[in-house]
Image (spheres, rainbow, N blue to C red):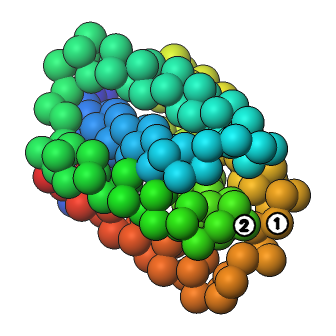
Amino acid sequence: MTDKGPAYLPGDPAPKGLVDRIIRVDQAGEFGAVRIYAGQRSVIREGKSADLIDHMAEQEARHLATFNRLVAERRVRPTALAPLWHVAGYALGATTALLGDKAAMACTAAVEEVIDEHYGGQLDELGEREPELRRVIEEYRADEVEHRETALAHGAAEAPAYPVLSAAVKSASRLAIWLSERY
């Protein structure tokens, strides 16, 4: 705070509140991603798609470990919805995989498109504050974009009812973000 007042506008979360919200929702999102890939791998057990899912899941597990560390270090309250994301993430992954490899890739492409937008918004909100957190978000955003591009290169857009599936997964992802920021 300066002698002119706080560096944020009335109604904006205070900087600590903003950082806590970012860490909480990102931990929840990475947890959800780990569960989606676990659901997909429970159905897709071999082949190129299984290998791709394993690679993406390894990166998401690393992301989750980082956000778990940040939650502990900064004493951020995790989302109360983790039990729901545990089940919902796995169910989304397994259900789309049951529709086939391309539907699993469509799920990945849709989720990662939303996460790319979400991380971009967080970077805008942070501005130049929190350089360590900014670096983490920028790095993980690049991984999420890579996942989306990989999914598209492996037939995501060829999935049955792709526009409907993609829209549904994006809507669910946006709702999960909104809820995890708050609860």
- Which dot marks residue 102? 2
Q: For numbered disc 2, what is the local secondary structure?
A: helix
Query: Measured from the top left, where is residue 67 in percent x and y?
Result: 39, 25
Q: Residues within 10 Å of mark 1 (few under 14, many from 20)?
A: some
Q: Is residue 111 above or below residue 41?
A: below
In this orientation, does residue 78 appear? yes
Mark 2: which amino acid? Lys
Image spot of residue 100 (x, y percent): 65, 67
Q: In this rendering, is residue 159 above or below 152? A: below
Q: Along the line of sight, which residue is nearer the eye, 36 or 67? A: 36
On screen, residue 75 versus residue 148, left or right, reads left
Can you tell which quarter of the image residue 88 is in?
bottom left
Q: Do the CB atoms of the residues marked 2 and 1 lie less than 8 Å apart?
A: yes
In what quadrant of the picture does the N terminus appear? top left
Identity, as a three-letter code, of the amino acid under mark 1: Gly
Task: Look at the numbered disc 1 and give the secondary structure of its residue.
Answer: loop
Q: CA distance from mark 2 to mark 1?
A: 5 Å
Q: Residues within 10 Å of mark 2 (few under 14, many from 20)?
A: many
- Residue 109 visible in rendering: no
Left or right of 176, for residue 167: right
The residue identified by callout 1 is 155
